[in-house]
Amino acid sequence: MKEVPIETGEKLWGPPERVVLVTSVDEAGKANIIAVGWAMRANMSPPVFAIGLGRKSQSCTNIAASGEFVFALPGTGLAREVMYCGTHSGREVDKFAETGLTALAASVVKAPLIDECLANFECRVTASQEIGDHRVFFGEVLAAWQGEAEEPHLLVVGTGSGYEQVHEEGAFRLGAVRP
Amino acid sequence: MKEVPIETGEKLWGPPERVVLVTSVDEAGKANIIAVGWAMRANMSPPVFAIGLGRKSQSCTNIAASGEFVFALPGTGLAREVMYCGTHSGREVDKFAETGLTALAASVVKAPLIDECLANFECRVTASQEIGDHRVFFGEVLAAWQGEAEEPHLLVVGTGSGYEQVHEEGAFRLGAVRP
């Protein structure tokens, strides 16, 4: 065990990383989507998910103001849409229009479900924490939806042969564990 | 997309999930280890990791009091040790003694490094948030260490053929993505 620069060490926290889509609405009701790689479970009962977002993002503004979001699980068929949502800002483009993803009305929150996802969870923010230039939101699950697709859950993947890479752009690789 | 009971929907948030070991010390200096599946990055610069722990755990008590922990990345060779640390309480056993894992002095924090891990990150708690019966700690990385092993990072894995399962106990499967 040898001490190394933090920048060297942090690269060892590598893939696979699950990626999710998060929807939100602004005060005028306009919906946005962001791709999020920093996501985890934060309580078992009731179920709570934590997501980490850049504080400058439209989604961070929306969720801070509305106190709600939808946490959606994309399958491998949505790799291009996820990459688009992760590399464009909702301040500049309409990501539902640009990706062709279908917004469906949720049952409790104003943020929309994404019809093409494997699952959608309607979440109400119960806490949030500013961390550096990010904000972590904790969302309690109020309702759950199951989609029809039976694809593997999309992941940020590594370069090994064990992964089935379905889309690559810049430093990002999306795919699944090879069946 | 159909609405389903939350208990049904939440099962769709499945593997792979990265698992880490977290060390801490109590006020007398006694070290403990816990296995954590709820872990994510929470800021890029400076690097911050978030971990979610049960509030009744010895590790939660230790980290709340000391404001420090070590975030360690186990490889596939440590599956049995990780399972032991995740299924036993530091209130009842000495997990370093029982697993045979080697505690090394860290450079900044009092919590020890684990010599057999792929990497260790010394973290100072900059924020924490109570969520249900869990607490999420945010730890800024103060120092990083790289180990000698070159194994794949240990994961909580699913049942598919794409995983190399190395240890199973009850409902838990540990392993890696098949090379």
Image: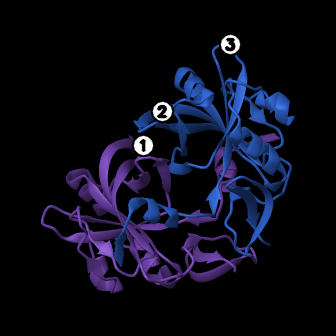
Chain colours: A blue, B purple
- Depth check, mark 1 against mark 3: the one in front is 3
Disc 2 residue type (three-letter): Thr
Disc 3 residue type (three-letter): Ala
Is disc 1 in the same subunit as disc 3?
no
Disc 1 residue type (three-letter): Ile
Q: CA distance from mark 2 to mark 3?
A: 23 Å
Q: Is residue A134 above or below residue B30?
A: above
Which residue occupies 23% across, 62% down?
B108
Q: Which residue is mark 1?
A: B131
Which residue occupies 80% across, 30% down?
A96
Q: Can residue B57 be seen from the camera position used here? A: no
Residue A169 as seen in the image, left or right of residue B121: right
Q: Which residue is mark 3?
A: A28
Q: Position of residue B134 (x, y in %)?
A: 40, 49
Dot 3: few (<14), some (14–19), or many (≥20) neighbours within 10 Å?
Answer: few
Which residue occupies 69% across, 49% down?
B9
Residue farthest top in this picture: A28
Which residue occupies 48% across, 36% down?
A135
Q: Which residue is mark 2?
A: A126
- Say if mark 1 contacts mark 2, CB within 8 Å: yes
User: Which sits in the foreground, A27 or A156?
Assistant: A156
Q: Is residue A64 above or below residue A28?
A: below
Residue A75 as seen in the image, left or right of residue B29: right
Q: CA distance from mark 1 to mark 2?
A: 8 Å
